[in-house]
Image: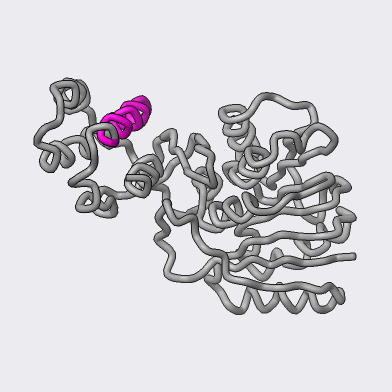
Amino acid sequence: MDVFTARALQRVQLYSLPFEEVKDVTEEEQNDFLEKLVLISKSNPYYASQILQKLLNIWPTASDEYYEYLSEWIASVPLSPTSIDTVIYTIGDHLIHMKECPSVIASGGTTGNRTWEAALALSEYLQNIDIKGNVLELGCGTGMVSIAMIMKNKSFLTNNHLFITDGDENVVNIAENNYNLNLPNNTNVIFQTLFWGTDPVPQVDTILAADVTYDSSVIPSLVETFVQSGAKRVLLAATRRNINTLQTFENSITEHNWNYTVEELPFPYRLMSTLSVPVLLYVIDLY
């Protein structure tokens, strides 16, 4: 039931939910999932109703309570692809709530409204390591990576600063709202617009980034931002979509005589990825 629940909270398409795996779950498991379904219905009653209708076909002993909820939700309509939904991601042992557009397709001005696979894979990776010192996130998008890092180690902000940045002010606002949805306000968390190659760069120990190597033209300013930050290490997750762009990135790393490793990041097993290409993790030691 764990995978089914996590993917429902993630808002995957109904055909991607493993209904066949939950036919014989216990009554307690059914009731636990109903609580999650009620949570889903708060922002997307249509999606909740579609799942519940299918479950009632395979859970013949479900109580009247299930049918009462269905009668509540049955008249609801689907959200548009650009409508905001509250998606809940299972990262490590944490449920992270994100206001975003889970059905949006990449296009101008919308990519920051959705959590993409590279951010999810990097967030899961961060559950298994400890980061010390000040941190700068580049290209924050919905804010998932920074939120996941703090959820794993809430004492991090006691003595360190976290800079959550993006080149788009609207995206920074999205990240800040999502941070506040999951974590208490903290003066050691700084949200700011950072346009690579133009704006002053905070001085930090570690840089985090996901899906920022999207075009060869941005590589020089991205790498220069690494230099200006004074960081000792960069953890960068990149979806391997364009081999030439990643080769340009690797060539730039080599030109700076930085040591780096590349490995394929496993995707969080409870969640679903629609990618046909891997997410790569670059660990770059700058000094």
Q: Nearer the viewer, residue 172 or 265?
A: 265
Q: Is 126 located above or below residue 182 in the figure?
A: below
Q: Is residue 285 visible?
A: yes
Answer with the quarter of the image where residue 77 lies.
top left
Q: Is 204 located above or below residue 100 in the figure?
A: below
Q: Nearer the viewer, residue 249 or 47?
A: 47
Residue at 48%, 44% in the rendered image: 90
Quarter of the N terminus within the rendering: top left
Range of residues picked out in magenta: 29-45
Q: In the rendered view, does 65 fall on the left or right side of 181?
A: left
Q: Is 143 located above or below residue 107 in the figure?
A: above
Q: Nearer the viewer, residue 86 or 261?
A: 261
Q: Position of residue 220 (x, y in %)?
A: 77, 67
Q: In the rendered view, does 266 fall on the left or right side of 248?
A: left
Residue at 14%, 36% in the rendered image: 56
Q: Position of residue 54 (x, y in %)?
A: 16, 41
Q: Is residue 44 visible?
A: no
Residue at 61%, 27% in the rendered image: 180
Magenta stretch prevailing secondary structure: helix
Q: Position of residue 157 (x, y in %)?
A: 77, 34
